[in-house]
Image (tube, rainbow, N blue to C red):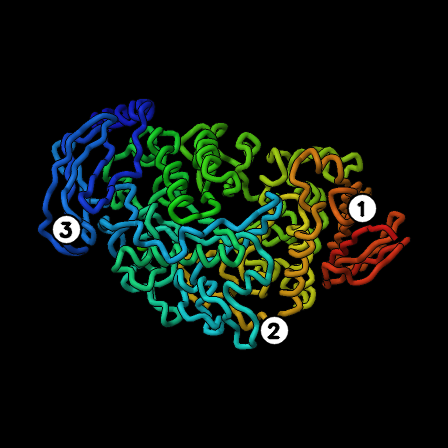
């Protein structure tokens, strides 16, 4: 107990005593003439680096480090050390810690056990110097598509050679068995702007020696990867040769480069909120306890639900996160970060991350899950919870509000607005404007409009992601008795609201191909047969795919659906007063000089019956109706009455006659 109290005191002191804040990313600095090591530890009594000739050899040569300014322990080894491996360990309280690659290893051996000494310059693919982030003239252009590398490419029908690997996303010209575009060409054709990949940093749950990608369902080959081991090295399971530390780095860069060439930006899913375990990970070994929050009894706090939670409020953990995202943005040209369980981090850290990324490129995206799995051991009002999103400018949060309103909550099997629930209308309206506290004179947003986003782009509009049911399964769970045709209508209706909302649009990969996960709502380690995107569905459900594609094109073509600021939303958006709880009339008006249309009008009908509504006077092009959509327009109408088919949205653009 006494030891615990002393340790906690130390940790508390450390939390506030890092004014100088040395760089953490320079733990291992390679040059041809020498390799220099520098590890931070204010509590170690001795530290040493152990150099190994091979990834698995024993008999290291040992370098004792010397403590210098800023509690940095330094040592140098002369000569060209490229190709060798290293670990670090520290001596405190009478014993040596276990070895680890350090907390900022940029290259690692198979399964991340040792750091690797390599020349990062030599991992750059040809043309890397010319690689640029795709132009994004307007910050509101974003449409994010989330996928797991294995889900996206493992299907026997993907037409992709390097299934389950980084290189799968470098292959152009791939086709499904029906000769439709797959892989990277599919993404281009769909019109998304950002690809968000599930964790691709080194994680612990897949044995890289067994990350079998030549056949489906190889045992132990699949995991989402929310179990970080080395935050700053790519996962070896996605490499064609995990035993060569340089290969995974080069291949991940090749993936980024190919996506950039295709005009697509890359968002990394980052999981700084917890580690795979504590004592098995460098964060737990190098400076024991410091990087984690502890409960009053000295046990590890567990806001992540995974056994521990990190302490972004501790100065060096905060700095670690800042340096880590900046490293990925600089070294790998990553264009955005999705923060897993962002609600575990404190707001100040998220603002620090935003400020640091702004210095690299202000168009780098930042958003995350504004919640935690369990209550974090930190004052709620200082955490990056969704409720406080407006205090973190240009950091977005996933909107469970629009999700639950459209298709129902993941925690029950109720229907949502798009599947016939009559109690969700006002929440959908709040979501359409991005939960900015929109005062609606027509009363369609309810008595107290939702407000947690300062600007609409901080509102990540989505209905599904890797967590919980995919869309087809969620609709099945609540409306299983309906026909498949009706379920597809509901699917289109819900996604129309996502894609035409003022927030940032986000879709889960494979929804456009009517994927199912066979009712599995947590497929984190399910076999490929559950998780793969079924490319054969692109032909089978081509009507659905074409609808998604057209709706994305409509979003891109009409600035009115992505006005970009709360002020503009308040100026241009209104909801017409409709008493029917299953009908929403969403109107964006006075768009001269902003959009090719004077007015945009969307009528959402969430009921099983066709409804009629009065159309404000004007000449309208119908961009979508009854489950069909075309950015060029399907036909024209002047009203005065509009008939909207069951479970569908009609989208109209008013122009000069
Ligand atoms: Ca790994």
Quarter of the image with the N terminus in it: top left
For the point 61% across and 73% down, which residue is it?
540
Q: Position of residue 455 (x, y in %)?
A: 62, 36
Q: Is residue 353 left or right of residue 123?
A: right
Q: Nearer the viewer, residue 232 or 342?
A: 232
Identify the mark at residue 52; answer none if there is no mark. 3
52 relative to 490, above or below: above
Question: What secondary structure is marked by label 2?
Answer: helix
**SS for dot 3:** strand
Residue 325 visible in image: yes
2 or 3: tag closer to the N-terminus: 3
* Residue at x-position 65% and y-position 47%: 405
Give the Cα distance between marks 1 and 3: 69 Å
Which quarter holds ligand 1?
Answer: bottom left
Residue 540, label in figure: 2
Residue 131, position in %: x, y? Answer: 45, 52
Q: Residues within 10 Å of mark 2 (few under 14, many from 20)?
A: few
Q: Which mark is residue 465?
A: none
């Amino acid at each position: 107990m006494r030891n615990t109290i002393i340790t906690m005191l130390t940790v508390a002191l450390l939390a506030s005593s890092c004014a100088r804040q040395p760089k953490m990313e320079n733990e291992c600095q390679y040059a041809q003439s020498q390799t220099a090591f520098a590890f931070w530890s204010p509590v170690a009594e001795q530290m040493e680096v152990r150099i190994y000739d091979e990834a698995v050899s024993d008999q290291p040569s040992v370098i004792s480090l010397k403590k210098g300014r800023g509690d940095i322990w330094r040592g140098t080894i002369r000569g060209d050390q490229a190709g060798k491996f290293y670990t670090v360990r520290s001596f405190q309280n009478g014993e040596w810690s276990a070895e680890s690659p350090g907390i900022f290893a940029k290259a690692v051996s198979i399964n991340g056990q040792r750091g690797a000494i390599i020349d990062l310059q030599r991992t750059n693919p040809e043309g890397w110097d010319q690689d640029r982030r795709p132009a994004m003239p307007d910050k509101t252009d974003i449409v994010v598509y989330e996928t797991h590398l294995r889900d996206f490419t493992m299907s026997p029908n993907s037409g992709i050679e390097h299934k389950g690997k980084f290189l799968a996303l470098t292959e152009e010209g791939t086709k499904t068995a029906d000769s439709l575009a797959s892989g990277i060409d599919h993404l281009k054709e769909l019109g998304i702007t950002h690809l968000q990949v599930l964790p691709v940093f080194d994680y612990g749950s897949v044995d890289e020696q067994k990350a079998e990608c030549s056949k489906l369902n190889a045992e132990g080959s699949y995991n989402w990867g929310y179990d970080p081991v080395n935050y700053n090295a790519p996962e070896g399971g996605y490499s064609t040769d995990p035993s060569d530390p340089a290969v995974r780095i080069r291949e991940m860069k090749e993936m980024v480069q190919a996506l950039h060439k295709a005009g697509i930006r890359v968002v990394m899913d980052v999981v700084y909120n917890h580690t795979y375990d504590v004592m098995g990970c460098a964060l737990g070994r190098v400076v024991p306890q410091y990087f984690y929050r502890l409960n009053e009894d000295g046990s590890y706090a567990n806001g992540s639900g995974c056994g521990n939670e990190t302490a972004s409020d501790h100065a060096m953990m905060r700095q670690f996160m800042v340096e880590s995202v900046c490293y990925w943005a600089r070294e790998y040209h990553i264009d955005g970060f999705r923060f897993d369980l962002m609600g575990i981090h404190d707001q100040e850290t998220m603002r620090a991350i935003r400020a640091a990324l702004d210095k690299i490129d202000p168009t780098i995206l930042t958003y995350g899950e504004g919640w935690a799995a369990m209550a974090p051991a930190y004052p709620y009002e200082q955490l990056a919870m969704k409720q406080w999103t407006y205090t973190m400018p240009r950091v977005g949060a996933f909107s469970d509000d629009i999700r639950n309103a459209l298709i129902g909550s993941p925690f029950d099997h109720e229907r949502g607005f798009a599947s016939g629930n009559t109690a969700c209308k006002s929440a959908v309206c709040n979501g359409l404007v991005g939960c900015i506290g929109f005062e609606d004179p027509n009363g369609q947003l309810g008595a107290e409009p939702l407000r947690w986003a300062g600007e609409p782009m901080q509102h990540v509009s989505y209905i599904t992601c890797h967590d919980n049911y995919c869309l087809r399964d969620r609709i099945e769970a609540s409306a299983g008795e309906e026909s498949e045709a009706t379920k597809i209508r509901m699917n289109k209706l819900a996604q129309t609201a996502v894609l035409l909302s003022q927030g940032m649009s986000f879709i889960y990969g494979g929804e456009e191909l009517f994927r199912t996960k066979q009712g599995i709502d947590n497929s984190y380690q399910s076999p490929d047969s559950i998780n793969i995107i079924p490319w054969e569905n692109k032909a089978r459900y081509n009507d659905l795919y074409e609808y998604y594609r057209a709706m994305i094109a409509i979003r891109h073509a009409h600035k009115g659906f992505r006005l970009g600021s709360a002020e503009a939303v308040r100026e241009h958006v209104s909801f017409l007063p409709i008493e029917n709880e299953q009908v929403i009339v969403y109107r964006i008006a006075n768009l001269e000089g902003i959009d090719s249309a004077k007015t945009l009008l969307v009528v959402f009908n969430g009921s099983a019956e066709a409804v009629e509504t009065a159309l404000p006077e004007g000449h309208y092009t119908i961009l979508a109706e009854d489950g069909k959509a075309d950015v060029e327009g399907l036909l024209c109408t002047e009203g005065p009455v509009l008939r909207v088919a069951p479970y569908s949205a009609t989208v109209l653009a008013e122009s000069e006659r």
